Image (tube, helix red, strand yellow):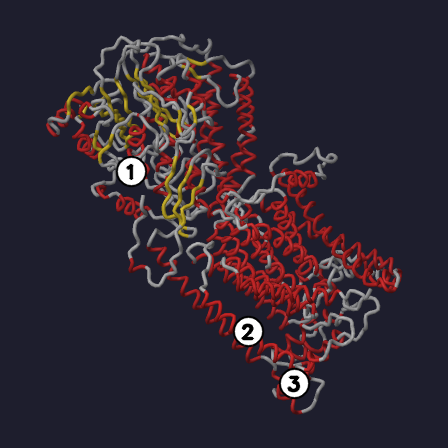
Amino acid sequence: MQPESVSATQIEYDVQTEQMLLSMGPQHPSTHGVLRLALRTDGEVVLAAMPHIGYLHRCAEKIGEKLTVRQFVPYTDRLDYLAAMNMNLGWALTVEKLLGIEVSEKTMHLRVLVCELDRIASHLVGTCALGLDLGSFTPFMWCFREREKILNLFEALCGARMLYNYVVPGGVMAEPPRGWLEQCRQFLDQFQPVIEDLHVVLTTNDVFIRRTAGIGVLSPQTAISYGCTGPVLRATGVCWDLRRHGEPIYTRMYDDYQFHIAAQTDGRYPQHGRQPPVPGSAVLGDSWHRFYVRLLEIGESAAVVRQAIDKYSRLKGAPSGPIPMRTKLPQAAAYLETEAPKGQLGFLIIGDGSAVPWRVRIRSPSFCNLSAVEEMCRGCLLADVPAIVGSLDIVLGEIDR
Amino acid sequence: MADHLANWFHPSLDWLAYTIAGAAGAALLLVVALMVAAVSMWLERKISARIQDRLGPTRVGGRYGWLQPLADGLKVLGKEDIIPAQADKLLFRAAPYLAYAAAFCTYMVLPFSGRWVALPLDSAVFMFLAVASLEVPAIILAGYASGSKYSLFGAMREAAQVVSYEIPLALCVVIPVMLAGTLSLSEIAEQQRGWLTSWLVFRNPFVCGAFFVFGICALAHTNRAPFDLPEAESELVAGFMTEYSGFRWVVFFMAEYAAMFAICGLGAILFLGGWNGPIPLTDLLGLRYDAGPLAGWLGDALGAINFIFKCFLGITCMIWMRWTLPRLRIDQVMSLCLKYCIPLATLMLAGCMLWQYAMPGGVVHTVGNAGHSHSPVAECTQHRPHAQRRLSNPLSGPGAPENSSLRQQPRLLLEATSVLLRGN
Amino acid sequence: MPMPANEPALLDMLKEQFAAAIQEADLSATDPWIQVAAEHLPAVAAFVRDHPQWRMEMLNCITGVDYWRDETTTANVDWQPHIELLYHLSSLARRSRLMLKVVLPRWKEGQVGQLPEVPTVSHIWRTAEWHEREVFDLVGVQFVGHPDLRRILCAEDWVGHPLRKDYQPPAEYRGIPIA
Amino acid sequence: MEAINWHSVFFYLFAALACGAAAAVVLCGNIVRMAFALVAALGAVAGLFFLAGADFLGALQLLVYVGGTMVLLVFGVMLTSHSPLFALRSGAGHWIAAVVIGACLLTVLLRAALAANAWASPPPPQQLPPRLQPTTSQIGLALLGVRTDKLDRPDPVLQKGMCGYLLPFEIASVHLLVVLIGAMFLARTKRRMAATGSGSNSSQSIPRQLEIGNANRPHDAQNPTCTPPGE
């Protein structure tokens, strides 16, 4: 992709430094996995950035044409390995939409509880990874300490720490053990000060603001045109969250929960407890706003989990179990998008009457978010590239499938 | 020491005595530099662990893991020494040793205590800055010789950053030198003998401001904390150190820690009274050389401990900054230097000059005899209270002649200014 | 809300706008879809994106599906061998969804190896650039007018299109044996 | 065995290093190696100054020459040359001319050096190296216009030189100021070009972004911007 040509008249007697082609990745400490960015730089200024992906391509869609819907669930864990619960939920809901199954209300509350906890864990990694890219190591350790507690909760629930295979079509694999809900409540009680610490160390830190405010600016039109979704879209001021604006089968789960959408409506973010003000130099849609939206969402998810614990424990009975292994799929197609932590995760299943789907298609949010990197990295400095890529919070497992 | 050895040996072997004395001095200095690097590495691990709610090294060597630097050293010595194919072999090997030489030479002129100084130079501060700026060619050598684009980027950033931060650093160093009237570090520290108030940093508000600007420039000079762009892991993998491994990489690392301690030492001497603690213990206990060599030696030892403690205080602040602040971008580092550090440093310099000109004896003295009308020039030549308190001339080691011209300093100045005034 | 309330009116408006282009449509299904002729795709897409009553600003996903049977396929289906391209669109302003379906022959004019062609929509939605590259890479559809049509997930010099039903993986790639 | 006079040993060492490095500068093909040989030569000269007891001058040499050459090397040689690794080719003709001019220059220098009486006679018997005398204060005052070392020689002839080196000191500083301003003017045009060309790197502006985006896609002209949805 050629950078736009600079007309000759602008260069008077300029010392023309030689342009350099720099390859950042696939083995690189700040590309969140095996992403290769081919940068054409002129000194420190990046003229063009072309991402190269496909290093982690495991042909998940081809495998989907060989396995039944129940057998494919562990593969969805490995798409976005930082938010496996939400991946499972997306697949489970799409299968339920294809088969026309309705799950019990108790299962829905448990699914909301588990997915929002997973969203907190995913956003914790997303925010502190950006901090690590900019050089501050300490918040990274704090966030991982909190994330460990969530992983311990999930281990108690379904035996695995990162790849759960828990939310399956038809319900959930196991009922929460005794005292698990109380442990969740204890975790939430001691969790709030951590967000304040992050605000102090990163959000209001002058050096952090200098490095992220006004960097990698994305306008709402460009974001929508590039298909960016999730925190990346909300940071540009577009108030769009599938948990409220999605399809009925998905929004039904979140209907009786009170939470704000973390987007700037008429110039102000929804106030949720003590939040630092937006710095003057921050332009709507830049890296700082993407970081800030994720921190707000952590607070919102924590509130939703608290409500889910109360609603779940109030209902009697047990959550519904999974559908039989060899359930036949109708000869039809179903496409459903859910709000994963990284953005809108879509699954398309085309059944052909047998138990094995004819075609499986996965719409990855990070795939579209990453495509906007070309636009944002043009004209930035070399040191801004990790700031921009880090603020997109991409996971290569999900991009390459 | 050389003379004791000389008359202990057979007269014809006195050259051997001098060689051994010289070698012993150099070895002692090298041990100091290595020990300092090891302790600050351990300190960094422990402090960063505490900041991040973890324990840091606890197993190697006792409960507090104080043998961890040794363990690291042995581990790295075991690592393979790779030289990349397209590297420039000769320069690639030379770079780390040049970097360490630059950092190590500053210890020559750094006085640890009144008598404990390797080379009591008259222009010690100037020598310190000259040798410290030798690290830039070494790192550029490393960056270029590694042959990879990343290290070249790291080297370019290093060159731009350290060269441009030398200006404010030099300006901040000039201020205490101007107050003390001499470039010799031992002399500057001697003048700050006494209670806390005699430290140069409290002499006037401008020196205090200069101390903070010096702190920032020291950080930038040693590539630490918000200014560690040349080896920014997230962008340049490891900057100029990308292609180095094994022993060569450790030499770079030791150079960085040695330079850190040295710049903290310079700061401690210029602003925080060197080996003169807040409470003048050596004076109170009467541990001076005229009370016998052992008492003098004890006084110097106490002073050295005090000085090393201040240096490690400085290093702790550097470590603390590193583990809380993210990294600045190269153009922000440059604009911070050109738009803030240099103007501030010049402002402090000008302010300190005017303050010293208006009130040479300090506020109390001037206010005290505000009534008498003195011409400022005569005021500053007749009696310079701080300059007078020069007890022992550092150059006059045992047995050296007393005729050095430092004693006649005021007379020279008086005649010089009178010649100027007569304008011939 | 699957579709704007007055679907029949909207469908008629589309039909009289693009008479030949709209082949079939079912706006009342759970996932409303319209089948469009390949050569009119960009025109319909631009219209659907900018018309105030549709406002499909976001292209969610482009999927290539290969309908092909041989004696081994167990399912009792009677599809004619063809390739379908599914364009999932969604409107943020009107909170509605739409799917454009384009039916293509498996090979261009029947010669095996000639990829079927369809005009690109990357100038309408910038995200189509990467999605079309992926469909070209995995399913094997030539997008006419795409600024930079290269493989995106597989290696640049990979042979064949893996998601086709009749795809046989090569024995080895640059000396590395493939099981 | 006659005592080893470390002073002369180091003197020969530094002299050999200086001459060897200077020769390397001339003979070396690779530009960057040549520059580093130059740095080594100047460093050796600094060593000679330290040996002679002029520590202030040695430090000055280190600071000015080694630092200055380094900046010249980095920003002059490395950034602008096509690739730092290319070698210089000098033809046979150049070598002959160089050797001839070098030889006659050498003879002139040797003649002048040996003519000076201090060096004509064999070196005096071993005397201790000069003790480190404080030298900086006199230099400093001389720069500021007072030749304190001539104070105690009252003969009228020498009085005339009392104003010391004030004038050259001022001329040099003005000259450096002019050079600084010139360099800044040159750099400024580069930044202006970068500002107008590939988007100012301080903060991206959204309209610029859209305009660049459209300019790149030729058939992208009719890409109307869609308004963001309400709540």
For image coordinates 40% across by 9% down, the residue present is A323
> Quick check: A305 above or below D166?
above
Residue at the extreme bottom = D156
Q: Amino acid at mark 2?
A: Ala
Of labels 2 and 3, the one closer to you: 2
- Give me the disc on residue D103: 2
Residue A99 coordinates in the image, percent (x, y): 32, 12
Q: Which label number is shown at residue B304?
A: none
Q: CA distance from mark 2 to mark 3?
A: 49 Å
Res. B231 visible in picture? yes
Q: Position of residue A214 (x, y in %)?
A: 40, 46
Regarding residue B263, the answer to whether it shows in the image is no
Residue indicated by mark 3: B419
Q: Secondary structure at mark 1?
A: loop
Q: Position of residue A316 (x, y in %)?
A: 46, 10
The quarter in which the C terminus of chain B is drawn is: bottom right
Relative placement, left or right, of D152 versus A288 is right
Which one is in front in this view, the residue at disc 2 or the one at disc 1? 2
- Residue drawn 37% across the image and 35% down it: A369
- Relative to B348, does residue C45 appear above or below in the rendering? above
Q: Pick the residue in front: C28 or C108.
A: C108
Local packing at callout 1 (Cα closer than 10 Å; few below 14, some 14-19, many 20+) is few
The amino acid type, in three-letter code, at marker 1 is Asp
- Chain at tag 3: B
Q: Amino acid at mark 3?
A: Val
**Secondary structure at numbered mark 2:** helix
The answer to whether mark 2 and mark 3 are in CB contact below 8 A is no
Q: Chain of mark 2?
A: D
